[in-house]
Image: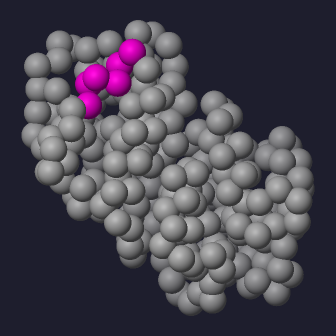
């Protein structure tokens, strides 16, 4: 399925290479070299996926991701970080900022294409095994809308990143059962991403903070993982 993709990369050679491979997949691509240009592009059009470098002139790619995730109407944008920052702490910071996937430079073009395909499948929902087929998932006062990636607590909308939404959906689908960190990692990060288990803890912490009055639907099972409370009334 064709997607509208924004590439934010200041190295011309890398940018042109990424654009070439994306267009070969049939995607519509807009390429820019800075966060300032990216803001302008996003103000003019809606994108399905963004591929973002870390080290950019002016504001950094991580700053751009955080800014984007704070915007309620951009919460469904899938984000892949493509950067030379490859230390484990960098990967954790990028994912915690709101990136859905992380690929280090130098990169293999085949791996890039595979990551984009995986994110595209998540966007289109063709392989969304975590999302229930029901229209609304009700967990007490917390309501989830899998088809539109919407979440409401006591009727008030909550803006989540795709990773946070998938985490919440995975937990709700297994309501009452404990999901280990490894199980959640496989459902949140997708193909080929190696992250430590404690990254899930950070995702859960951020998710609970956003859920506010509905945060107590998620329980921590010490030493094992997380679950949604089994006795919530619909």
Q: Where, by quadrant of the figure, is residue 84 drawn?
A: bottom right
Q: Is residue 195 visible?
A: yes
* Colouring used for the render: one colour
Q: Residue at 71% across / 67% down in the picture?
A: 54
Q: Residue at 45% across / 38% down in the picture?
A: 206
Q: Which residues are magenta?
A: 213-218
Q: Where, by quadrant of the figure, is residue 43 drawn?
A: top right
Total number of numbered labels?
A: 0
Q: Nearer the viewer, residue 54 or 119?
A: 54
Q: Residue at 45% across / 10% down in the picture?
A: 155
73 lies left or right of 43? left
Q: Is residue 208 above or below residue 28?
A: above
Residue 22 percent coordinates (x, y)? 66, 74
Indicate yes or no whether the magenta region holds residue 212.
no
Residue 186 percent coordinates (x, y)? 30, 62
- In which quadrant is the C terminus drawn? top left
- In which quadrant is the N terminus drawn? bottom right
Q: Residue at 18% across / 53% down in the picture?
A: 180
Residue 67 percent coordinates (x, y)? 71, 43
Q: Is residue 120 visible?
A: no
Chief SS of the magenta region:
helix
Residue 110 percent coordinates (x, y)? 53, 87
Q: Is residue 162 above or below residue 230?
A: below
């Amino acid at each position: 399925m064709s997607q509208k993709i924004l590439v934010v990369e200041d190295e011309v050679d890398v940018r042109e290479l990424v654009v070439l491979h994306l267009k070969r997949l049939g995607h519509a691509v807009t390429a820019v070299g800075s966060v300032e240009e990216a803001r302008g592009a996003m103000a003019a059009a809606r994108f399905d996926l963004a591929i973002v470098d870390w080290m950019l002139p002016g504001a950094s790619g991580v700053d751009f991701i955080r800014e984007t995730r704070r915007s309620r109407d951009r919460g469904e944008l899938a984000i892949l970080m493509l950067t030379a920052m490859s230390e484990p702490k960098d990967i954790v910071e990028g994912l915690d900022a709101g990136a859905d996937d992380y690929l280090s430079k130098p990169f293999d073009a085949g791996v890039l294409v595979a990551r984009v395909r995986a994110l595209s499948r998540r966007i289109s929902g063709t392989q969304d095994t975590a999302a229930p087929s029901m229209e609304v998932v009700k967990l007490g006062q917390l309501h989830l809308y899998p088809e539109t990636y919407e979440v409401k607590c006591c009727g008030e909308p909550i803006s989540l990143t795709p990773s946070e939404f998938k985490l919440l959906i995975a937990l709700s689908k297994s309501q009452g059962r404990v999901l280990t960190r490894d199980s959640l990692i496989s459902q949140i990060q997708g193909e080929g991403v190696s992250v430590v288990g404690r990254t899930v803890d950070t995702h859960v912490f951020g998710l609970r903070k956003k859920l506010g009055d509905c945060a107590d639907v998620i329980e921590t099972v010490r030493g094992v993982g997380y679950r949604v409370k089994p006795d919530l009334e619909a």
